[in-house]
Amino acid sequence: MEPLVFPKIEWKNEATNHKEVDKLEKELNDWLSVYCKAAGMNGSLVSHKLSYFSTRIWHYGSYERVLAIAKLIAYFFVVDDFFDVMDRKWTRYQYGRLIEIALNDEIVPLQGDNWFQACWSDLWQSFTRLANNEWKYRLINSCATWFKGAELELKFKQSKKIPSLVEYLTLRPFSEGGEFCFNFIEFAANKYLSQNTLSNPVFNSLLQYSRLVLFATNDLYSFRKETKKGDVMNLVMVYHNEYKISTQEAIYKTVEFIQENLKIFESYKDQLVSALIPDDDMQFYVSGLEAMFRGNYDFHFDSKRY
């Protein structure tokens, strides 16, 4: 059998990374190892270079802000793998506790087997210290959206049933974690959008096309990992199953999906953003979305996670 070909995507912006990436990587790994040890997780996550997801995407943020983001993202990487094999009722309870801890700025000391809640409580203190309350509530809501979406995915993952294309495209944009990543553009830049912009239909359409680019890019380059893992929430698998085409054809179709939605994003950016979004300083946010596309892509080649 011919080896599968995964085409590279052409992006307008160059690959970049945070100027203190090595220091951030070490501090994140040292912090994460404390909780992984408490959880009884064997093996090191160093080769996964989990900080690179954050240092590439939010490379423009201060050291302190990018470290806070990197802790939350690394935590969610670990949690995502962990919860795939857990009971849904237990998972639902734990997700509820995370929201409760964040809403109340609750301090949970590490003791016994409570690493899951203690780690979250620890990382949340950075946001308590650095962010305003309005933005924090938006971040909490974004995390809650991801938790609920991830739970809905479990019915497919645990039954090993590949969703239909309609089922997949309905759920995946809100279950892949894009919402809190969007929040972090503001946090990293320490600039915050107005309520008028946040509720603007053009702005929200721009985010929807961003979601499509992001999850399809992830699906494309994580396909081999997810195949080995037995995961079914992957656009390549969905195309393969829906259209009864070869895996290679499904890969090419996924690339086309990314390129088509990227073109629509660019069209929105060029034709509608400045004309129809009232915020005078939207450029930082649009640049942040473009950095997210590129950083998400580059991370798949940095990390041995894939």
Image (cartoon, rainbow, N blue to C red):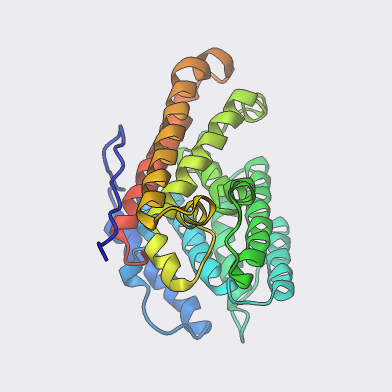
Residue 81, position in %: x, y?
Answer: 52, 70
Residue 106, position in %: x, y?
Answer: 69, 65
x 58%, y 77%: residue: 115
x 38%, y 43%: residue: 255
Q: Is residue 232 left or right of residue 141?
A: left
Q: Residue pushed farthest top?
A: 275
Image quadrant holding the N terminus, namely bottom left
Q: Is residue 174 visible?
A: yes
x 41%, y 48%: residue: 217
Q: Is residue 59 visible?
A: no
Q: Is residue 180 left or right of residue 71?
A: right
In this rendering, is residue 304 above or below 38?
above
Image quadrant holding the C terminus, namely bottom left
Residue 196, position in %: x, y?
Answer: 66, 24
Residue 91, position in %: x, y?
Answer: 68, 71
In front: 86, or 162? Answer: 162
Residue 276 in which image quadrant = top right
Residue 107 in which image quadrant = bottom right
